[in-house]
Image (cartoon, helix red, strand yellow):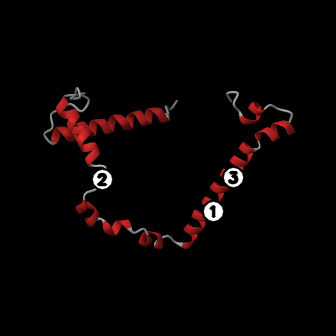
Amino acid sequence: MTHTTTQPERISDDIDSVSLNLKDNLHEAGNTTDVNELHKPDFSLETIGRYCTTRFTELFPTKEAIAANRHLLNPLPGLRMIPGKQWLMIISAFWAWSWDAYDFFSVSLNAATLAKDFDKTVKDITWENGL
């Protein structure tokens, strides 16, 4: 009788081999810290202050970053690279999404009328009963 490896066993073996390779690579690079070792986070006032300061100052790009990346702000070169068939797919996906939204809201706006027509309560029509 032959033993076949199931999918979860293969995934587990792959994960084990990846973690062993990672440990070997770190050890060869001279990093002696254990990759599975957890370190206690530093919650000192200095660290918290630096975190809060950098969160707000990094929200807005500097003038130098804007000047260096100004060419990335123009979307037209990227849009010109999209072929015609891809544009048709984009337009049809947008049309289908729009039609789905129209259908959803038309049912939502007419829930009372639909409930009356089908002799149900509005709660049954709108699935508010926990389905």
Which of discs 1 and 3 lies nearer the camera? The answer is: 3
In what element is the residue under mark 2?
A: loop
Q: How far from the left and from the top, in percent, is residue 52?
A: 26, 38
Structural crowding at the residue carrying mark 2, measured as other residues with C-alpha within 10 Å and reported as few (<14), some (14–19) or many (≥20): few
Q: Furthest residue to the left?
A: 30
Structural crowding at the residue carrying mark 1, measured as other residues with C-alpha within 10 Å and reported as few (<14), some (14–19) or many (≥20): few
Q: Which residue is mark 3?
A: 102
Q: Nearer the viewer, residue 69 or 25?
A: 69
Identity of the residue drawn at 42% across and 72% down: 77
Instruction: Name the amino acid, label 3.
Output: Tyr
Instruction: Name the amino acid, label 1.
Output: Ser
Identity of the residue drawn at 27% across and 49% down: 58
User: 115 left or right of 74?
Assistant: right
In what element is the residue under mark 1?
A: helix
Residue 50: quarter of image: top left
Structural crowding at the residue carrying mark 3, measured as other residues with C-alpha within 10 Å and reported as few (<14), some (14–19) or many (≥20): few
Q: Which residue is mark 1?
A: 92
- Whether residue 5 is visible here, answered yes or no, is no
User: 112 left or right of 60?
Assistant: right
Identity of the residue drawn at 76% across and 31% down: 124
The residues bearing labels 1 and 3 have C-alpha atoms spaced at a distance of: 15 Å
Q: Which residue is mark 2?
A: 60
Q: How far from the left and from the top, in percent, is residue 23?
A: 23, 36
For the residues bearing labels 2 and 3, Cβ distance under 8 angstroms:
no
Image quadrant containing the C terminus: top right
